[in-house]
Image (cartoon, helix red, strand yellow):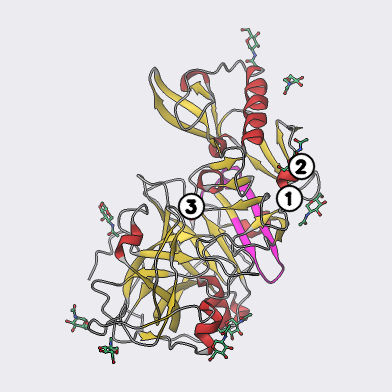
Amino acid sequence: MPLLHSYSFSFSVFFIIYLLSPAHAISFVSPIQKDDSTLLYSLTLFLKTPLQPTRLHLDLGASFTWVACDAGYNSSTYQHIPCFSPLCNSIGHNLSCSNCFNAPSPSCANDTCSLFPENSVTRKTAISTALTDSLALPTSDGSTQGPPILLSSYIFSCSPTSLLEGLANNVTGLVAFGRSNYSLPAQVTNTFSVPRCFALCLPRSTSDPGVSLIGSVGPYYFSPQKIDLSKSLVYTPLVLNPVGSTVVTYAGEPSDEYYINVTAINVNGKPIQINSSLLTVDENGFGGTKLSTAAPYTVLETSIYNALTEAFVNESSALNLTVTNAVKPFSVCYPAADVIVTRVGPGVPTVDLVMQSDDVFWRVFGSNSMVRIAGDGGYVWCLGFVDGGVNPRTAVVIGGHQMEDNLLQFDSDNNRFGFTSSVLLKGTTCSNFNFVS
Ligand SMILES: *[C@@H]1O[C@H](CO)[C@@H](O)[C@H](O)[C@H]1NC(C)=O
Ligand SMILES: *[C@@H]1O[C@H](CO)[C@@H](O)[C@H](O)[C@H]1NC(C)=O
Ligand SMILES: *[C@@H]1O[C@H](CO)[C@@H](O)[C@H](O)[C@H]1NC(C)=O
Ligand SMILES: *[C@@H]1O[C@H](CO)[C@@H](O)[C@H](O)[C@H]1NC(C)=O
Ligand SMILES: *[C@@H]1O[C@H](CO)[C@@H](O)[C@H](O)[C@H]1NC(C)=O
Ligand SMILES: *[C@@H]1O[C@H](CO)[C@@H](O)[C@H](O)[C@H]1NC(C)=O
Ligand SMILES: *[C@@H]1O[C@H](CO)[C@@H](O)[C@H](O)[C@H]1NC(C)=O
Ligand SMILES: *[C@@H]1O[C@H](CO)[C@@H](O)[C@H](O)[C@H]1NC(C)=O
Ligand SMILES: *[C@@H]1O[C@H](CO)[C@@H](O)[C@H](O)[C@H]1NC(C)=O
């Protein structure tokens, strides 16, 4: 049995299949951990029979989950998906059917449906078998823990162990949260009568987990005041990118990533100069703004990056802040001793991502805009955005650092994205979800 020291769940009731009543607003809760070396996030869920805690890289835009199973995948309930079956056609487009001449195993079968699992950080892919197996998730009514729920035929892909390279040290696969019909939220919400909606609260801390809540539109209670963060959500429509950009794509298939319509970026309330065509997704899938857990920091197309850093330096000089030597990959840094720290982090100019109207904006305070790092003359605070080059596929990729300690809701039923801006303003953090009470 793997070590369970970091999770406060009870395992004794895992074989109970609990019948859900939608009226109770039950959601499926899992802790999100942040890795201190890669700065990537992972989710712990329970897979196989008997159920094993399984730590998977959390990928917001991926289409399906994959798990390394070329060594030591031991479960009494896994099943292959037959070639040319409706399920294989639906998930894998009948694209590849494989045979195998080794001993039968999860990754080796004849006439079996195969998929192309992808590592979204390294952009590597492989061909591997599709499987179904048991998956369990703990539940919560928003404040107290309920019994775990079992999905007896969770659909995912095997992968070679080598596909894990570039992810956090001890993840054994990737869990997909994308718009596809086979992501974790889609399979959970297709199985139970719960809203097609999930929320993520990514932790700043590498020791105290954040939380993912699947199947509930709220309430989402956080301590210490039992504050319901769903009350603080502001909404913007989700935008469809008509062209997917995974390594293996299918003609005519849209992207499973989440795009939003950022129309302007303001520094201290003043719009920066942006070529607006960059902010629009074109018919080839280029341009626009997406959210990504594969990028630790927000990545901006070069002209947007330059406009942001210039405006930020200019506005900071009004606060008597003078740039010091930069620390890569950042270009604007200030001596930490010169910067006052407020309850929303370093006191620096605000950066607003403005959406469909001037009063709908995601405000990025110092705790999400600035990164504290050791420079050659002591600690510095650097503007935590990076230059994505002159011709990136996506103009604005909102990365992990900017999403932490913000509650984010992905509501497929209403095709909208909700955000709170920094929950530090509400006196809580993403590590303050009550897993047990
Ligand atoms: C697989 O799991 C079963 C049941 O837990 C156990 O009896 C068996 O020894 C395991 N096999 C391997 C190769 O670990
Ligand atoms: C895939 O296989 C299924 C089942 O045989 C069949 O109904 C479907 O038309 C096939 N789809 C394609 C795109 O070949
Ligand atoms: C697949 O079929 C071939 C030819 O019949 C056979 O040699 C092989 O053992 C089979 N593989 C598995 C995993 O059953
Ligand atoms: C993950 O790896 C770290 C160091 O490599 C180790 O301390 C920790 O216990 C591991 N966690 C799990 C859940 O295996
Ligand atoms: C999504 O998957 C479910 C089963 O998991 C299936 O019943 C449904 O038809 C699928 N929807 C689409 C749009 O493919
Ligand atoms: C994005 O916002 C702009 C400006 O309000 C609008 O013209 C455009 O139609 C919107 N795009 C989408 C996909 O909603
Ligand atoms: C704005 O960006 C588009 C797309 O990159 C480009 O074709 C156009 O020339 C740019 N316009 C200006 C004024 O720079
Ligand atoms: C620089 O800041 C000053 C004072 O806040 C403002 O008036 C000016 O427009 C800014 N210039 C640029 C290029 O942002
Ligand atoms: C900036 O420094 C000047 C001169 O030392 C001082 O008069 C001014 O009050 C300072 N402004 C701020 C915002 O700290």
> Is residue 413 shown in magenta?
yes
Residue at 51% x, 22% y is 334
Residue 18 badge:
none
Depth check: 308 or 95 in front?
A: 95
Q: Is mark 1 within 8 Å of ligand 6?
A: yes
Depth check: 316 or 13 in front?
A: 316
Q: Is residue 252 visible?
A: yes
Horizontal side, residue 120 vs residue 258: left or right: left
Residue at 69% x, 39% y is 352
How far, Cα to Cα, is label 3 from label 1? 21 Å
Q: Is mark 2 within 8 Å of ligand 7?
A: yes
Q: Reply above or below: 304 against 398.
A: above
Horizontal side, residue 114 vs residue 19: left or right: left
Q: Position of residue 146 (x, y in %)?
A: 46, 75
For the record, the magenta segment spans 408-429
Q: Reply above or below: 189 against 281.
A: below
Quarter holding the N terminus is bottom left
Residue at 75% x, 32% y is 273
Question: Disc 2 residue type?
Answer: Ser
Depth check: 339 or 379 in front?
A: 379
Q: Which residue is mark 1?
A: 280
Q: Which residue is mark 3?
A: 294
Q: Position of residue 91 (x, y in %)?
A: 53, 78
Q: Position of residue 154 (x, y in %)?
A: 45, 80
Residue 276 badge:
2
Q: Mark 3 and mark 1 in contact? Answer it, CB < 8 Å.
A: no
Question: Disc 3 residue type?
Answer: Ala
Depth check: 180 or 194 in front?
A: 180
Tag 2, which secondary structure? Answer: helix
